[in-house]
């Protein structure tokens, strides 16, 4: 049975990718038929959390969403 470190290495590219943003991207876009749903849900929860903590304004969220669709 794999331990936590094995799972992190195999499934989240831990120590295989130096840049955090690439590691998160590769993990979220893994070869899974649910990848679009997972990425969308993760980004949605992140934006909500940042808004709830006062780290994002409504205007910044609007700008972000506009950038996503264009």
Image (spheres, helix red, strand yellow):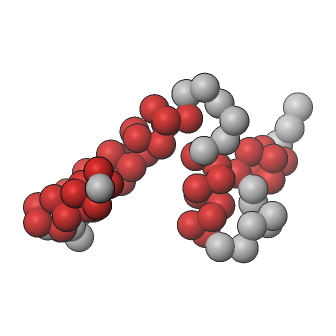
- Considering only vertical position in the picture, is 1 above or below 50? above
Q: Is residue 27 above or below residue 55?
A: above
Q: Nearer the viewer, residue 17 or 9?
A: 17
Give coordinates of residue 32: x percent, y percent: 65, 30
Q: What residue is rendered at 59% in x and 57% in y?
A: 24
User: In the drawing, does residue 42 fall left or right of residue 50?
Assistant: right
One can see residue 52 in this view: yes
Quadrant of the image containing the N terminus? top right
Residue 49 locus on image (x, y percent)? 29, 55
User: In which quarter of the view is residue 68 placed?
Assistant: bottom left
Q: Quadrant of residue 31?
A: top right
Expressed as whole percent of the image width and height from the top left, the position of residue 43 reads 39, 49
In the displayed structure image, the side of residue 56 where residue 11 appears, left or right: right
Q: Give the residue furthest to the front.
A: 70
Q: Position of residue 4 (x, y in %)?
A: 76, 46
Query: In this image, 53 relative to 36: left or right?
Result: left
Q: Residue at x 57, y 67 (%)?
A: 21
Q: Residue furthest top?
A: 33
Q: Residue at x 82, y 43 (%)?
A: 3
């Amino acid at each position: 049975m794999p331990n936590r470190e094995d799972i992190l290495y195999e499934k989240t590219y831990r120590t295989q990718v130096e840049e955090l943003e690439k590691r998160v991207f590769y993990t979220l876009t893994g070869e899974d038929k649910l990848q679009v749903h997972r990425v969308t849900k993760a980004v949605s929860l992140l934006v909500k959390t940042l808004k709830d903590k006062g780290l994002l304004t409504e205007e910044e969220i609007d700008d972000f969403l506009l950038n996503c669709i264009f």
